[in-house]
Image (cartoon, rainbow, N blue to C red):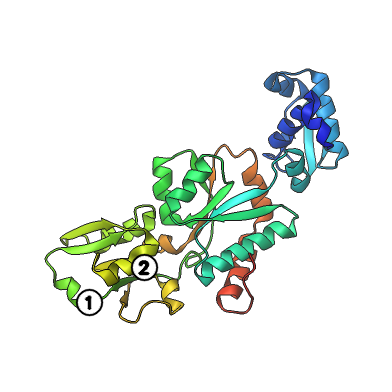
Amino acid sequence: MENRLLFNKKGLITIKLAKELLQYSPGDRIDTVDSYSKRFHCSRGIIQEALAVIEADRAIKTEKRGSLGTFLQEIDYKKLIKLANWGIFTGASPLPYTRRVEGFATAIYHEMESKGIPFHFAYMQGARNRAAGVLNNKYVFALMSKTSALDIISEQPELSILMEFEDFTYTGGYALLFKDDAYADKDVIRVGIDRNSPEHVDLISKIFSGRKAEYVEVQYTRMIPEILSGGIDVTVYNKDVLALQIVYENIKFKDIELSAKDLDATRTVLLIHKEDYGIANVLNEIIKIDSVTKIMNEVVTGKSMPVY
């Protein structure tokens, strides 16, 4: 579609119609011209012209079945995205400070590039921060643990999980971090907690249930300095970071045994807005769970280099 179409009625309706069609799958029946005319407050002729533009670009192929209506035979989501004037897709990801996160980002970029979809990640700490971006339509999706997603959805029902991956795709597990074993004998334990990460809050609440604990709010990336300075006694930490062997020598750790339910904290999900204007269809078409998992594991094991 030529850029000049963006500035006339037909161009604007073409954009709206392309966004509408992104919500469909091949085999679906689309609404009537009269229905779209009423919904978009324009003439039937404008709707017919907009459909003609979309079909001429081969973004869709339709079949008329008489009184049954018009059905979609084929959909080219890449072309529909361009016609819908989406620009570059942006997803929200945790900071890429572990091989697992690097692997996941590499896999998502691979999936997008293989379909020719312009894409980039915004990297930020805190699942709640990433979810807020999706809620405000800044990002088309956010990566986080299933535990975090479920907690956030309970507060923000406008959000939903589009797809979820296997256990240990988000993290390889968790450990307790501390400097002095004697912390466990204290009457009141100072526990570092990052409330922007619901899985962190969930695990800490379970582990220190029944103990006298003072919860000290600390940004996740500041946990180790706070332990070293004595600001906190202990916290829960991502085992993947420990595997990088960048933790200070006088920091100790102990593996946390996870229950079946706790494994949700190790599982990656894609969080989207329910009013996604067809984004769910597009992402399901582009992102394949088996392919993402394979590429991520190759990066984690060193068989492939991260590229993101």
> Which amino acid, by three-letter code, is at mark 2?
Tyr
Mark 2 neighbour class, 10 Å CA radius: few under 14, some 14 to 19, many 20 or more? many
The residue furthest front is 229
The residue furthest right is 56
> Which amino acid, by three-letter code, is at mark 1?
Asp
Residue at 52 percent across and 39 percent down: it is 136
Q: Which image quadrant for residue 302?
A: bottom right
Q: Quadrant of the C terminus?
A: bottom right
Report if residue 79 is visible in the image: yes
The numbered dot on residue 170 is: none
Q: In x, y percent, where is residue 236?
A: 33, 66
To which residue does mark 1 refer? 180
The residue furthest left is 187
Q: In x, y percent, where is residue 280?
A: 62, 45
Rendered position, 239 above or below 263: below
The numbered dot on residue 237 is: 2
- Label 1 element class: loop
Q: Quadrant of the N terminus?
A: top right
Label count reads: 2
Mark 1 or mark 2, which is nearer the start of the sequence? Answer: 1
Residue at 82 percent across and 31 percent down: it is 5
- Label 2 element class: strand
Q: Which image quadrant for residue 266?
A: bottom left
Residue at 74 percent across and 60 percent down: it is 114
Report if residue 47 is visible in the image: no
Residue at 88 percent across and 38 percent down: it is 56
- Which numbered disc, 2 or 1, marks the residue closer to the eye? 1
Q: In x, y percent, where is residue 177?
A: 31, 72
Mark 1 neighbour class, 10 Å CA radius: few under 14, some 14 to 19, many 20 or more? some
